[in-house]
Amino acid sequence: MRLAADKEQPLVWSHVDSAALSAATVVAAALRFWHLGRPAEPVYDETKVLSQAQSFLHGWRPPYSTHPPAAKLLVALSVSLFGNYPWGWRAANALVGTALIPITYLLARRLFRSKLTACIAVGLLLCDGMILVTSRLAMINALYITVAAWAYLMLWGFAQEQDPRRQRLWLLALGVLLGLYAGAKAGISEVGFLFVLIVVCAILVRQSSAQIGVETIGPVVKRVVAACGLLIAVGLLVYLAVFLPLYGAGWQGVAGLIAYHWHVFRRNLNMPSTYPDASPFWSWPFLIHPYSYWKRERVDGLIQVIWCGGNPLLWWAILPAILIASIRGWRERDLAWMFLAGGYAAYLAMWIPLRRYLFIYSYMPAAYLGVLALAGALARCWRGDAFRWERCALLAPLLPCLILPLGAAWGGLAMSVILAAYFLLSWRSRAGGGRFVFLMLGGGVALLFAYFFPLWTGIPLSQAGYASRMWLHGQGMASWQ
Amino acid sequence: VSGDHRHLGDLALIAAAAMAVAALFILSYRADRPCIGETASCYRIDPLSGNLKQRWWVSEDLSATQVKFNRIGADAAELEIQPADSSRSETDWGVSYTSSLFSPGWYEFTTELRTNGRVAKGGGARIELSSDRWRFVSRGQRFGQGNWRRINIYFQPADYNPMVEISCRFAGVSPHSPASALLRNMRLVKIAGMPPRRKARFNMQKKEEARFRRRRRRSRGSGGFGGVALIAVLLGLSAGICWRLLG
């Protein structure tokens, strides 16, 4: 296996990095804080989270929740700092959601050793609606997604660190963040924790083998066990610390902790398999059944919605990007590509044994890794390094994005023109074709972000405007309404 | 020196971005203050004021094209509903108004309702007021009765969900028998102190507190913090050993 660090010299921080990081952070903050207090009422699960947050603030025992309390503590902190009204409920999450953007820049830059890839990654992430909605509501998802991204950044800092003593510091930070991740979201975080442990083992085996040779297996095992032990111990310590406020509210020692986890486990086992707005995990990458967190049809006919759906082109382009990541990871033995493809697969495969109802927002941790993979694939297109099949695969998601809103005839015609232009440019030069793919996909994602923006922020839309954005409106699962 | 200059330039860029984010944060905070000023500073909400068509929304089974909601006076409005779906005569159709009451305390809700016209037997209009799990439903007024009915209730919303929803709902109307009702003098006013005795009242905050207190009492018992502290110490020791092994 190969790390990106093996191939190139360390990437020097430059004005480009500072400018890109700064600009992306400011844009992220503007998108998240614009009309943050609207709707001026709890949206969807905000009611549950606020109930928990208020119970922490009053010192009451909070009502039962499937998820550990870290994200609710953040909302409680937000309410105590900024006030008990919609802006105050959501401000801390909006800050955390803003922080996701610079963290993603640094992560993509480390993963691919490329400023271009980092810029593309934050550009794509800024254009995703589900991440935006998550960052604008007082729910639990913004915290765990951001903490997971931060943990991946620490993981890659560890992977690219040569000094074993400094590696420990990266591991320590990684353990803290993984504990916080587990303390914010149940189920998904445990899979993430396990996946990171496997990656840490793979990195240590590779590094130790390079340093001391494969014949001396003892020191390798010692390092692997110690690293995993450190991560698990620190992670568990932080996880326990997250529950401390519950002890102040009447929990009973270890018994309380065990009873809570047993209750969560049993409750999940006994949950029904169907529920309004729920959808099976395999449907999430295809964006078949997004739904409205909140919807109002005003008497004047205008519709306001907070829509729990991603940017269609971005989500559909993640599928070929993950295919590219898998094949490149396999062929090039490149750990960065393997990490993205493996993480994506793990976050989806974890749902296979579960029979309970699920919602599309649980796709976010997989989609996040998919966005990074897409950024890597698009950067290769821009540089002219992408294979022809990769470029064609990345163009494919444009087809449904043209046919669904424009109809088969006009959409097909538009796609034909795009393909003709692509083959013409590809025939003249490989780089030209790659850059065309980059511009079409990047431009398309940005355009669709602007088009769907009212759905994610509750801007009033006419009936026709709303209907035109609901590309799937069947009676069954294939419905966006 | 050039390296230092470059370093300073990077720092300046990042500092400028941090200041811009802080400015956006403050602007957003100030811009959204009116959302609470509307309720907390004047302590009074007049749902029948302003642009009714922008402030009221239709119930899920209804389309805006099937609703007429027009002002007929300074503080009065006429609501007419003609559903398009004849197969759903059992459905209650209506319009709603949502507001959040961010100033903790008691509120008084008052309104007057009068039905117009005649529809099939059993049809009527009513007012609903809901906040979180609590819902007040006024007695239905049959269509065609023609006299004003006054509705008056006191309530205190819960801290964690201070939202209140006011609805006017019609039952028994169909595409062939549209119905209308008049609403007037509708308002939500925060009152000082407690509501008058013998008046209908509901305290969501007290219900919540009682619910949480019950939970807390139930959970109070023998257990202590010692076991958790011991686990924490063991985990800390394990982390320390692993740390040394990695050095």
Image: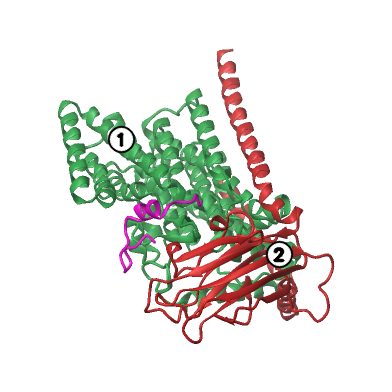
**Mark 2 and mark 1: Cα distance apart in space:** 56 Å
Name the residue tied to disc 1: A438
- Asked whether the viewer can see residue B144, the reply is yes
Residue A239 in sight here: no
- Which residue is more in the foreground, A336 or A464? A464
Residue at the spot 58% in from the left edge and 20% down from the top edge: B9
Q: Reply above or below: A12 against B133.
A: above
Chain ID, mark 1: A
Q: Amino acid at mark 2?
A: Leu
Q: Please report contact status of discs 2 and 1: CB closer than 8 Å, yes or no.
A: no
Relative image position of residue B93 (x, y in whole percent): 49, 73
User: Which one of the lettered chains is coloured red?
Assistant: B
Q: Which residue is mark 2?
A: B188
Residue B232, image x and y in percent? 67, 62
Q: Amino acid at mark 1?
A: Phe
In magenta stretch: residue A454? no
